[in-house]
């Protein structure tokens, strides 16, 4: 997305498309009030909802009867004059109003994320709040919703402001030491004070970085890989848990060649189930690639479900699975009987065909997801971009602490690097290279 002009007045449907009781069309910019008056007559007072008939400015034809609201700058979402038209949610009504707005001079349709971009440009939101807003729109579970609400509400922004204040404090101490470098005791005394401030800051950064994987996992979903020998019932279990025919089920070995994903809400936590190719020796090129992908996905998973066929048990998963990831063993097809001999290990008995044991399995998966996502304090770092900037900040501060404190110019540069990383995290400086990608993730109208 190119940098939009702040002089344009933009409009878009801000609610979802399709038939609905109410649809919201939003306008933002200096001509928003004029466009409202062109369709609905004299503008109501700011923040007062009124019912008006909307007429096409060119033909005078009625478009709808709508609830209208306006918000004057700077007290609006974007920081500009904003108008909302709450119209009936039929496709013809929506298209009629949008078409009429398109013929008003000075108005143009909004680009994806342009309302949020203007809120950022007008300092109504910082980048962490923008990302939280995007996550809020896309949240599918209650746990994701809670995390997105914290971030869109400014919790990470507040943390960043506190960290930034500590860096400014340390920088002021180093600058003071530079100013009085000819005094015998001042540089060393002030340097120790600055080091104490940075020590405290690094401890805070480290605690939040340690929970970053938890926040990213909650945003992306807890990854569970179904693995086992061919015909162990992986695809049947995937279909049973997802309550739909997501994967092809066949008695022919090697039916699953590529990974298949379904997204579930288990106890309010997002879980991604991944069906994979059966693990066996094969000379087939396509099946071999599927097996390679199975190993790759299992190695990156949060949990592997190793399915054992009760009729032809292969009890032990390959060492490539059991040695590096958390594995839960399942004995499937118990409706056909159970083996007389089995290893002395915990194994959950299930039947993907009849549903036996699946309630317990779902409870176990939900408990694993909860433990992996919400143990301890809520995570503030939810995206790879945020984590990388915070790691850069921490590394610069570690350089400050490990370097010779009397090299004041170098220590001041360490603090500047740390401050720039925090600036990129919140959007204060050097963020043009990431803005298009972030705002491009939004739908039209937001």
Image (cartoon, grey):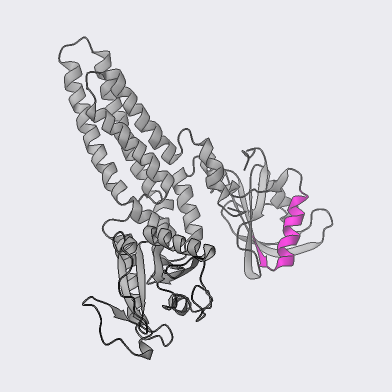
Name the residue rendered at 67%, 41% in the picture: 8
Question: Which residues lie in the magenta part?
Answer: 86-104
Q: Is residue 128 left or right of residue 371?
A: right
Residue drawn at the location 84% of the way across and 57% of the way down: 59
Q: Is residue 209 magenta?
A: no
Left/right placement of residue 187 relative to residue 124 reads left
Residue 205 image point, x, y percent: 29, 42
Q: Is 159 placed above or below 88 here?
A: above
Which of the two residues, 2 or 221, is positioned nearer the viewer here? 221
Count of numbered labels shown in the rendering: 0
User: Does any portion of residue 269 appear in the rendered image?
Assistant: no
Is residue 93 found inside the magenta-colored segment of the image?
A: yes
Percent x, y of residue 353: 44, 86
- The vertical placement of 80 against 134, above or below, is above
Q: Quadrant of residue 356?
A: bottom left
Identified at 55% across, 47% down, the residue is 439
Horizontal side of 158 relative to 38 (left or right) equals: left
Image coordinates of residue 231 in percent, x first then y, are 44, 78
Q: Which quarter of the rendered picture does the N terminus lie within?
A: top right
Q: Name, please, the residue furthest toward the top.
A: 182
Q: Looking at the picture, how far across and down is residue 186, in whole percent?
A: 18, 16
Residue 376 visible in the current orientation: yes
The foreground one among 395 and 285 is 285
């Amino acid at each position: 997305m190119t940098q939009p002009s702040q002089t344009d007045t933009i409009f878009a449907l801000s609610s979802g498309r399709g038939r609905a009781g109410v649809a919201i069309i939003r306008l933002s910019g200096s001509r928003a009030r004029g466009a409202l008056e062109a369709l609905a007559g004299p503008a109501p007072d700011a923040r007062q909802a009124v019912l008006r008939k909307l007429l096409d400015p060119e033909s005078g034809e009625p478009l709808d009867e709508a609830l209208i609201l306006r918000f004057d700058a700077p007290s609006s979402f974007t920081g500009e004059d904003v108008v909302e038209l709450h119209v009936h949610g039929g496709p013809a009504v929506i298209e009629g109003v949008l078409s009429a707005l398109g013929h008003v001079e000075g108005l143009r349709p909004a680009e994806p994320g342009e309302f949020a971009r203007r809120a950022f440009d007008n300092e109504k939101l910082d980048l962490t709040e923008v990302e939280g807003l995007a996550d809020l729109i896309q949240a599918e579970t209650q746990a994701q919703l809670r995390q997105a609400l914290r971030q869109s509400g400014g919790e990470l922004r507040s943390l960043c402001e506190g960290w930034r204040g500590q860096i400014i404090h340390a920088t002021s101490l180093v600058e003071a030491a530079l100013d009085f470098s000819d005094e015998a005791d001042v540089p060393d005394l002030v340097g120790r004070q600055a080091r104490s401030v940075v020590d405290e800051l690094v401890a805070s950064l480290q605690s939040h970085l340690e929970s970053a994987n938890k926040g990213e996992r909650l945003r992306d979903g807890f990854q569970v890989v179904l693995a086992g020998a061919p015909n162990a019932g992986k695809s049947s279990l995937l279909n049973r848990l997802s309550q739909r025919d997501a994967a092809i089920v066949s008695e022919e070995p090697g039916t699953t060649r590529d990974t298949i994903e379904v997204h579930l809400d288990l106890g309010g936590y997002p879980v991604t189930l991944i069906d994979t190719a059966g693990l066996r020796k094969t000379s087939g090129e396509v099946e071999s690639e599927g097996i390679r992908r199975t190993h790759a996905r299992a190695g990156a998973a949060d949990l592997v479900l190793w399915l054992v066929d009760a009729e032809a048990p292969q009890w032990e998963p390959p060492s490539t699975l059991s040695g590096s990831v958390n594995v839960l063993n399942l004995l499937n097809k118990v409706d056909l009987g159970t083996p007389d001999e089995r290893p002395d290990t915990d194994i959950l008995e299930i039947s993907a065909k009849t549903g036996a044991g699946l309630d317990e399995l779902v409870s176990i998966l939900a408990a694993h997801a909860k433990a992996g996502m919400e143990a301890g304090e809520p995570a503030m770092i939810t995206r790879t971009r945020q984590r990388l900037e915070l790691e850069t900040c921490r590394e610069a501060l570690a350089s400050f602490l490990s370097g010779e404190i009397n090299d004041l110019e170098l220590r001041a540069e360490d603090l500047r690097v740390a401050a720039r990383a925090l600036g990129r995290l919140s959007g204060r400086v050097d963020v043009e290279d990431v803005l298009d990608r972030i705002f491009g993730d939004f739908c039209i109208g937001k």
